[in-house]
Image (cartoon, rainbow, N blue to C red):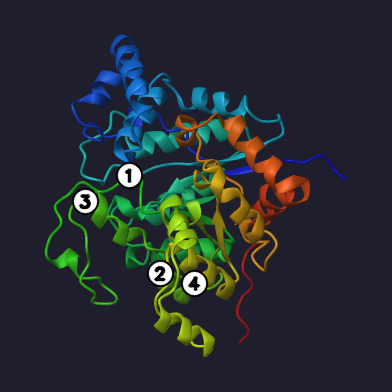
Protein backbone atom coordinates (compact mmCIF):
# COMPACT_ATOMS: atom_id res chain seq x y z
CA UNK A 1 0.00 0.00 0.00
CA UNK A 2 1.23 3.48 -0.88
CA UNK A 3 2.24 5.81 1.97
CA UNK A 4 -0.66 7.85 3.30
CA UNK A 5 -0.86 11.44 2.04
CA UNK A 6 -2.97 13.30 4.60
CA UNK A 7 -5.27 16.01 3.24
CA UNK A 8 -6.28 18.53 5.90
CA UNK A 9 -9.05 20.17 3.94
CA UNK A 10 -9.91 22.92 6.43
CA UNK A 11 -7.25 25.30 7.80
CA UNK A 12 -6.69 29.06 8.10
CA UNK A 13 -3.54 31.17 7.94
CA UNK A 14 -4.90 34.74 7.91
CA UNK A 15 -3.18 37.05 10.38
CA UNK A 16 -4.21 39.83 12.76
CA UNK A 17 -3.47 42.25 9.89
CA UNK A 18 -6.40 40.81 7.89
CA UNK A 19 -8.90 41.23 10.75
CA UNK A 20 -11.21 44.31 10.94
CA UNK A 21 -10.27 46.82 13.62
CA UNK A 22 -13.52 46.32 15.57
CA UNK A 23 -13.46 42.54 15.22
CA UNK A 24 -12.51 42.33 18.91
CA UNK A 25 -13.65 44.60 21.78
CA UNK A 26 -11.53 47.12 23.72
CA UNK A 27 -9.31 47.95 20.73
CA UNK A 28 -7.64 44.55 21.14
CA UNK A 29 -6.87 44.14 17.43
CA UNK A 30 -4.56 47.15 17.64
CA UNK A 31 -3.13 46.06 21.01
CA UNK A 32 -2.31 42.57 19.73
CA UNK A 33 -0.07 44.06 17.05
CA UNK A 34 2.27 45.28 19.80
CA UNK A 35 4.55 42.45 20.92
CA UNK A 36 4.79 43.94 24.40
CA UNK A 37 1.05 44.22 24.99
CA UNK A 38 0.32 40.99 23.17
CA UNK A 39 2.48 38.97 25.57
CA UNK A 40 0.90 40.55 28.64
CA UNK A 41 -2.67 40.19 27.38
CA UNK A 42 -2.11 36.63 26.11
CA UNK A 43 -0.83 35.49 29.48
CA UNK A 44 -3.91 36.90 31.18
CA UNK A 45 -6.31 35.53 28.56
CA UNK A 46 -4.91 32.01 28.71
CA UNK A 47 -5.27 32.02 32.48
CA UNK A 48 -8.92 33.10 32.21
CA UNK A 49 -9.64 30.61 29.38
CA UNK A 50 -9.20 27.73 31.82
CA UNK A 51 -12.39 28.85 33.55
CA UNK A 52 -14.67 29.70 30.61
CA UNK A 53 -16.07 28.09 27.47
CA UNK A 54 -17.53 31.34 26.13
CA UNK A 55 -17.03 31.21 22.38
CA UNK A 56 -16.44 34.91 21.81
CA UNK A 57 -13.84 34.98 24.57
CA UNK A 58 -12.10 32.00 22.99
CA UNK A 59 -12.01 33.85 19.66
CA UNK A 60 -10.09 36.60 21.43
CA UNK A 61 -7.56 34.11 22.77
CA UNK A 62 -7.10 32.50 19.35
CA UNK A 63 -6.50 35.87 17.69
CA UNK A 64 -4.03 36.83 20.42
CA UNK A 65 -2.05 33.67 19.69
CA UNK A 66 -2.21 34.25 15.93
CA UNK A 67 -0.96 37.82 16.40
CA UNK A 68 2.46 36.37 17.20
CA UNK A 69 2.83 35.90 13.44
CA UNK A 70 3.34 38.75 11.02
CA UNK A 71 2.86 36.68 7.86
CA UNK A 72 0.55 33.94 6.64
CA UNK A 73 3.61 31.87 5.75
CA UNK A 74 4.67 31.78 9.41
CA UNK A 75 1.33 30.28 10.43
CA UNK A 76 1.52 27.82 7.53
CA UNK A 77 4.98 26.61 8.51
CA UNK A 78 3.91 26.23 12.14
CA UNK A 79 1.01 24.05 11.01
CA UNK A 80 3.18 22.02 8.64
CA UNK A 81 5.44 21.24 11.58
CA UNK A 82 2.71 19.04 13.10
CA UNK A 83 2.26 16.81 10.04
CA UNK A 84 4.27 14.52 7.73
CA UNK A 85 6.09 16.47 5.03
CA UNK A 86 3.88 15.24 2.17
CA UNK A 87 0.64 16.47 3.81
CA UNK A 88 -1.61 18.78 1.76
CA UNK A 89 -3.55 21.67 3.31
CA UNK A 90 -6.68 23.48 2.20
CA UNK A 91 -6.09 27.14 3.11
CA UNK A 92 -9.44 28.88 3.52
CA UNK A 93 -9.29 32.63 3.09
CA UNK A 94 -11.73 34.95 4.89
CA UNK A 95 -13.34 38.03 3.34
CA UNK A 96 -14.16 40.15 6.39
CA UNK A 97 -14.32 43.45 4.52
CA UNK A 98 -18.15 43.53 4.60
CA UNK A 99 -18.92 42.35 8.14
CA UNK A 100 -19.27 45.98 9.34
CA UNK A 101 -16.55 45.76 11.95
CA UNK A 102 -14.32 48.43 10.45
CA UNK A 103 -11.49 48.14 7.94
CA UNK A 104 -8.62 45.67 8.27
CA UNK A 105 -5.04 46.86 8.04
CA UNK A 106 -4.62 44.61 4.98
CA UNK A 107 -7.78 44.10 2.94
CA UNK A 108 -9.05 40.89 1.38
CA UNK A 109 -7.32 41.50 -1.95
CA UNK A 110 -3.98 41.73 -0.14
CA UNK A 111 -4.75 38.48 1.68
CA UNK A 112 -5.40 36.79 -1.69
CA UNK A 113 -2.20 38.22 -3.16
CA UNK A 114 -0.21 36.71 -0.29
CA UNK A 115 -1.94 33.32 -0.67
CA UNK A 116 -1.18 33.29 -4.40
CA UNK A 117 2.49 33.86 -3.59
CA UNK A 118 2.39 30.96 -1.11
CA UNK A 119 0.87 28.73 -3.80
CA UNK A 120 3.83 29.53 -6.04
CA UNK A 121 6.24 28.69 -3.23
CA UNK A 122 4.49 25.53 -1.98
CA UNK A 123 2.63 24.24 -5.06
CA UNK A 124 2.27 20.63 -3.89
CA UNK A 125 1.55 21.32 -0.23
CA UNK A 126 -1.30 23.84 -0.31
CA UNK A 127 -4.68 24.31 -1.99
CA UNK A 128 -5.90 27.88 -1.38
CA UNK A 129 -9.65 28.59 -1.42
CA UNK A 130 -10.92 32.05 -2.31
CA UNK A 131 -13.66 33.41 -0.06
CA UNK A 132 -16.68 34.61 -2.05
CA UNK A 133 -19.03 37.28 -0.72
CA UNK A 134 -22.03 38.45 -2.80
CA UNK A 135 -21.41 42.07 -1.75
CA UNK A 136 -18.00 42.22 -3.44
CA UNK A 137 -18.02 43.97 -6.86
CA UNK A 138 -16.51 42.09 -9.79
CA UNK A 139 -16.71 38.79 -7.93
CA UNK A 140 -16.71 36.47 -10.95
CA UNK A 141 -13.70 38.12 -12.59
CA UNK A 142 -11.80 37.96 -9.30
CA UNK A 143 -12.77 34.31 -8.85
CA UNK A 144 -11.54 33.38 -12.32
CA UNK A 145 -8.28 35.25 -11.73
CA UNK A 146 -7.58 33.37 -8.50
CA UNK A 147 -8.23 30.01 -10.15
CA UNK A 148 -5.72 30.95 -12.86
CA UNK A 149 -3.24 31.71 -10.06
CA UNK A 150 -3.59 28.19 -8.67
CA UNK A 151 -6.47 28.41 -6.20
CA UNK A 152 -8.39 25.16 -5.93
CA UNK A 153 -11.90 26.26 -4.97
CA UNK A 154 -14.07 28.71 -3.08
CA UNK A 155 -15.02 29.42 0.53
CA UNK A 156 -18.37 30.66 1.87
CA UNK A 157 -18.91 32.17 5.30
CA UNK A 158 -22.63 33.11 5.41
CA UNK A 159 -22.78 34.31 9.06
CA UNK A 160 -20.77 37.32 7.89
CA UNK A 161 -24.11 38.62 6.65
CA UNK A 162 -25.57 36.81 3.62
CA UNK A 163 -27.44 33.69 2.53
CA UNK A 164 -25.70 31.07 0.37
CA UNK A 165 -28.61 31.26 -2.09
CA UNK A 166 -27.98 34.98 -2.75
CA UNK A 167 -28.43 35.32 -6.53
CA UNK A 168 -25.29 37.45 -6.77
CA UNK A 169 -23.34 34.23 -6.12
CA UNK A 170 -25.00 32.33 -8.97
CA UNK A 171 -22.45 33.23 -11.64
CA UNK A 172 -19.61 31.96 -9.43
CA UNK A 173 -21.57 28.79 -8.66
CA UNK A 174 -22.16 28.23 -12.38
CA UNK A 175 -18.44 28.71 -13.06
CA UNK A 176 -17.46 26.35 -10.22
CA UNK A 177 -19.96 23.71 -11.33
CA UNK A 178 -18.78 23.85 -14.95
CA UNK A 179 -15.11 23.66 -13.95
CA UNK A 180 -15.51 21.02 -11.23
CA UNK A 181 -14.27 23.39 -8.53
CA UNK A 182 -15.28 22.61 -4.92
CA UNK A 183 -16.86 24.93 -2.37
CA UNK A 184 -16.32 24.71 1.39
CA UNK A 185 -18.85 26.59 3.49
CA UNK A 186 -19.12 27.35 7.19
CA UNK A 187 -22.02 25.35 8.64
CA UNK A 188 -22.25 25.59 12.41
CA UNK A 189 -24.13 27.98 14.73
CA UNK A 190 -20.98 29.60 16.09
CA UNK A 191 -18.04 31.43 14.59
CA UNK A 192 -17.49 34.95 13.30
CA UNK A 193 -20.63 36.97 12.57
CA UNK A 194 -21.90 40.14 10.90
CA UNK A 195 -21.95 43.23 13.14
CA UNK A 196 -24.41 45.49 11.31
CA UNK A 197 -27.96 46.53 12.27
CA UNK A 198 -30.66 43.87 11.97
CA UNK A 199 -33.53 45.53 10.11
CA UNK A 200 -37.22 44.47 10.23
CA UNK A 201 -36.93 43.29 6.62
CA UNK A 202 -34.09 40.96 7.59
CA UNK A 203 -36.37 39.29 10.13
CA UNK A 204 -38.27 37.61 7.28
CA UNK A 205 -36.59 34.64 5.59
CA UNK A 206 -36.33 35.57 1.88
CA UNK A 207 -37.35 32.09 0.71
CA UNK A 208 -39.79 30.73 3.29
CA UNK A 209 -41.30 33.94 4.67
CA UNK A 210 -40.60 32.59 8.15
CA UNK A 211 -40.14 35.07 11.01
CA UNK A 212 -36.50 34.69 12.03
CA UNK A 213 -35.28 34.55 15.61
CA UNK A 214 -32.18 36.04 17.17
CA UNK A 215 -31.91 38.47 20.06
CA UNK A 216 -28.51 39.74 18.95
CA UNK A 217 -26.20 39.49 15.96
CA UNK A 218 -24.48 36.32 17.12
CA UNK A 219 -27.82 34.52 17.47
CA UNK A 220 -29.31 35.99 14.30
CA UNK A 221 -26.31 34.85 12.23
CA UNK A 222 -27.48 31.26 12.76
CA UNK A 223 -30.18 31.95 10.20
CA UNK A 224 -27.52 32.53 7.54
CA UNK A 225 -25.68 29.32 8.51
CA UNK A 226 -28.64 26.91 8.54
CA UNK A 227 -27.83 23.89 6.32
CA UNK A 228 -31.38 23.91 4.91
CA UNK A 229 -30.40 27.06 2.98
CA UNK A 230 -28.25 24.94 0.66
CA UNK A 231 -31.28 23.12 -0.74
CA UNK A 232 -31.93 26.22 -2.86
CA UNK A 233 -28.33 26.22 -4.14
CA UNK A 234 -28.33 22.51 -4.94
CA UNK A 235 -31.66 22.79 -6.74
CA UNK A 236 -30.07 25.26 -9.17
CA UNK A 237 -26.61 23.67 -9.32
CA UNK A 238 -26.97 19.91 -8.68
CA UNK A 239 -23.44 19.09 -9.89
CA UNK A 240 -21.76 21.66 -7.64
CA UNK A 241 -19.44 20.06 -5.07
CA UNK A 242 -20.19 21.53 -1.63
CA UNK A 243 -18.66 20.65 1.75
CA UNK A 244 -20.64 21.69 4.84
CA UNK A 245 -17.79 22.53 7.19
CA UNK A 246 -17.93 21.49 10.84
CA UNK A 247 -20.79 19.05 10.03
CA UNK A 248 -23.19 21.38 11.85
CA UNK A 249 -20.93 21.91 14.89
CA UNK A 250 -20.62 20.36 18.33
CA UNK A 251 -23.70 22.06 19.79
CA UNK A 252 -25.85 20.41 17.10
CA UNK A 253 -24.14 17.04 17.56
CA UNK A 254 -24.99 17.18 21.26
CA UNK A 255 -28.64 17.87 20.39
CA UNK A 256 -28.66 14.74 18.23
CA UNK A 257 -27.04 12.57 20.90
CA UNK A 258 -29.12 13.82 23.82
CA UNK A 259 -32.59 14.43 22.33
CA UNK A 260 -35.25 12.31 20.66
CA UNK A 261 -38.02 12.85 18.13
CA UNK A 262 -41.41 13.74 19.65
CA UNK A 263 -44.12 11.04 19.41
CA UNK A 264 -45.90 12.66 16.44
CA UNK A 265 -42.65 12.65 14.47
CA UNK A 266 -41.96 9.03 15.43
CA UNK A 267 -45.34 8.07 13.97
CA UNK A 268 -44.56 9.93 10.73
CA UNK A 269 -41.25 8.10 10.41
CA UNK A 270 -42.91 4.74 11.11
CA UNK A 271 -45.31 5.51 8.27
CA UNK A 272 -42.35 6.22 5.98
CA UNK A 273 -43.15 9.91 5.69
CA UNK A 274 -40.65 12.75 5.35
CA UNK A 275 -39.21 14.15 8.58
CA UNK A 276 -40.78 17.50 9.41
CA UNK A 277 -38.89 18.19 12.60
CA UNK A 278 -35.18 17.37 12.39
CA UNK A 279 -33.63 17.02 15.84
CA UNK A 280 -30.65 19.15 14.90
CA UNK A 281 -28.59 20.48 12.04
CA UNK A 282 -26.67 17.21 12.27
CA UNK A 283 -29.74 15.21 11.20
CA UNK A 284 -30.56 17.78 8.51
CA UNK A 285 -27.06 17.42 7.05
CA UNK A 286 -27.21 13.62 7.18
CA UNK A 287 -30.50 13.58 5.26
CA UNK A 288 -29.19 16.08 2.71
CA UNK A 289 -25.98 14.10 2.15
CA UNK A 290 -27.98 10.93 1.60
CA UNK A 291 -30.07 12.74 -1.02
CA UNK A 292 -27.51 14.86 -2.88
CA UNK A 293 -24.62 13.14 -4.63
CA UNK A 294 -22.15 16.03 -4.49
CA UNK A 295 -22.70 17.13 -0.90
CA UNK A 296 -19.91 16.48 1.63
CA UNK A 297 -19.16 17.45 5.24
CA UNK A 298 -15.91 17.90 7.17
CA UNK A 299 -15.19 17.29 10.86
CA UNK A 300 -13.11 20.45 11.36
CA UNK A 301 -13.01 21.68 14.96
CA UNK A 302 -16.07 19.57 15.89
CA UNK A 303 -13.93 16.44 16.25
CA UNK A 304 -11.67 18.02 18.88
CA UNK A 305 -14.38 16.95 21.35
CA UNK A 306 -13.41 13.33 21.78
CA UNK A 307 -16.92 12.26 22.78
CA UNK A 308 -17.87 12.72 19.11
CA UNK A 309 -15.26 10.30 17.73
CA UNK A 310 -17.49 7.20 18.14
CA UNK A 311 -20.21 8.92 16.09
CA UNK A 312 -17.74 9.73 13.31
CA UNK A 313 -16.62 6.09 13.35
CA UNK A 314 -20.24 4.97 12.95
CA UNK A 315 -20.80 7.39 10.05
CA UNK A 316 -17.75 6.01 8.24
CA UNK A 317 -19.48 2.63 8.14
CA UNK A 318 -22.67 3.91 6.48
CA UNK A 319 -23.62 5.09 3.00
CA UNK A 320 -21.90 8.37 3.92
CA UNK A 321 -18.46 6.76 4.03
CA UNK A 322 -17.31 8.53 0.87
CA UNK A 323 -18.72 11.92 1.90
CA UNK A 324 -16.81 12.75 5.10
CA UNK A 325 -13.61 14.82 4.93
CA UNK A 326 -10.79 15.32 7.40
CA UNK A 327 -10.14 18.88 8.54
CA UNK A 328 -8.84 20.40 11.76
CA UNK A 329 -9.75 24.12 11.57
CA UNK A 330 -6.18 25.08 12.39
CA UNK A 331 -5.37 27.47 13.94
CA UNK A 332 -8.72 27.77 15.71
CA UNK A 333 -8.50 24.27 17.19
CA UNK A 334 -5.19 24.90 18.92
CA UNK A 335 -6.81 26.62 21.87
CA UNK A 336 -8.20 23.21 22.84
CA UNK A 337 -5.33 20.95 21.78
CA UNK A 338 -2.30 20.91 19.52
CA UNK A 339 -2.73 20.18 15.84
CA UNK A 340 -0.81 16.93 16.19
CA UNK A 341 -2.94 15.81 19.15
CA UNK A 342 -6.10 16.50 17.15
CA UNK A 343 -4.86 14.50 14.17
CA UNK A 344 -3.56 11.55 16.20
CA UNK A 345 -6.73 11.37 18.31
CA UNK A 346 -8.84 11.12 15.16
CA UNK A 347 -6.45 8.71 13.44
CA UNK A 348 -6.05 6.49 16.48
CA UNK A 349 -9.78 6.16 17.06
CA UNK A 350 -10.72 5.66 13.40
CA UNK A 351 -7.95 3.18 12.59
CA UNK A 352 -5.81 3.33 9.46
CA UNK A 353 -8.46 2.14 6.99
CA UNK A 354 -11.13 4.65 7.99
CA UNK A 355 -8.64 7.47 8.54
CA UNK A 356 -7.24 6.95 5.03
CA UNK A 357 -10.76 7.05 3.62
CA UNK A 358 -11.50 10.35 5.35
CA UNK A 359 -8.08 12.03 5.10
CA UNK A 360 -6.91 10.91 1.66
CA UNK A 361 -9.41 9.06 -0.55
CA UNK A 362 -12.40 11.35 -0.07
CA UNK A 363 -10.49 14.67 -0.19
CA UNK A 364 -8.72 13.65 -3.41
CA UNK A 365 -12.10 13.14 -5.07
CA UNK A 366 -13.51 16.35 -3.59
CA UNK A 367 -10.53 18.42 -4.75
CA UNK A 368 -10.25 16.80 -8.18
CA UNK A 369 -11.04 19.31 -10.88
CA UNK A 370 -13.20 17.67 -13.52
CA UNK A 371 -15.14 19.80 -15.94
CA UNK A 372 -18.83 18.93 -16.02
CA UNK A 373 -20.05 17.13 -19.09
CA UNK A 374 -22.42 19.09 -21.29
CA UNK A 375 -26.06 18.08 -20.80
CA UNK A 376 -27.45 15.76 -23.46
CA UNK A 377 -29.69 17.54 -25.91
- Which residue bears the numbered disc 3? 217
The circle on residue 228 is 2
Mark 3 closeness class: few <14, some 14–19, many ≥20 residues within 10 Å: some
Question: In the rendered image of this protein, does residue 43 appear above or below residue 115?
Answer: above
Q: Reading the chain from its start, which is encountered first: label 3 or label 4?
A: 3
Residue at 70 percent across and 29 percent down: it is 85
Residue lying furthest top: 36
Give whichever of 80, 61 is nearer the camera.
Answer: 61
Mark-to-mark CA distance, 1 and 2: 20 Å
Q: Reading the chain from its start, which is encountered first: label 1 or label 2?
A: 1
The circle on residue 237 is 4
Residue at 28 percent across and 28 percent down: it is 105
Circle 3: element type: helix
Q: Is residue 359 left or right of residue 251?
A: right
Q: Reading the chain from its start, which is encountered first: label 3 or label 1?
A: 1
> Where is residue 117 shown, x and y percent of the image?
52, 31
Image quarter in which the N terminus is found: top right
> Where is residue 325 shown, x and y percent of the image?
61, 52
Mark-to-mark CA distance, 1 and 4: 27 Å
Amino acid sequence: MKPLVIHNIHTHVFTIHHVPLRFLPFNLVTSFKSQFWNRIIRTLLHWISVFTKNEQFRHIVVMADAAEHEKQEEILLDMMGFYPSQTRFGLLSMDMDYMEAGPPEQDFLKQLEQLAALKQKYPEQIVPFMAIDPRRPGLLDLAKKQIELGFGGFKLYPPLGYYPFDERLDEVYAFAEAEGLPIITHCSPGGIYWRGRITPEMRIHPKTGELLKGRNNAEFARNFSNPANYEYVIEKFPRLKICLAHFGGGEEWDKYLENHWPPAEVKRRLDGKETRMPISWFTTIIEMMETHQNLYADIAYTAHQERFLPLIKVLLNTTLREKILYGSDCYMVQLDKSERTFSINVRGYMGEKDYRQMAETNPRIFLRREKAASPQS
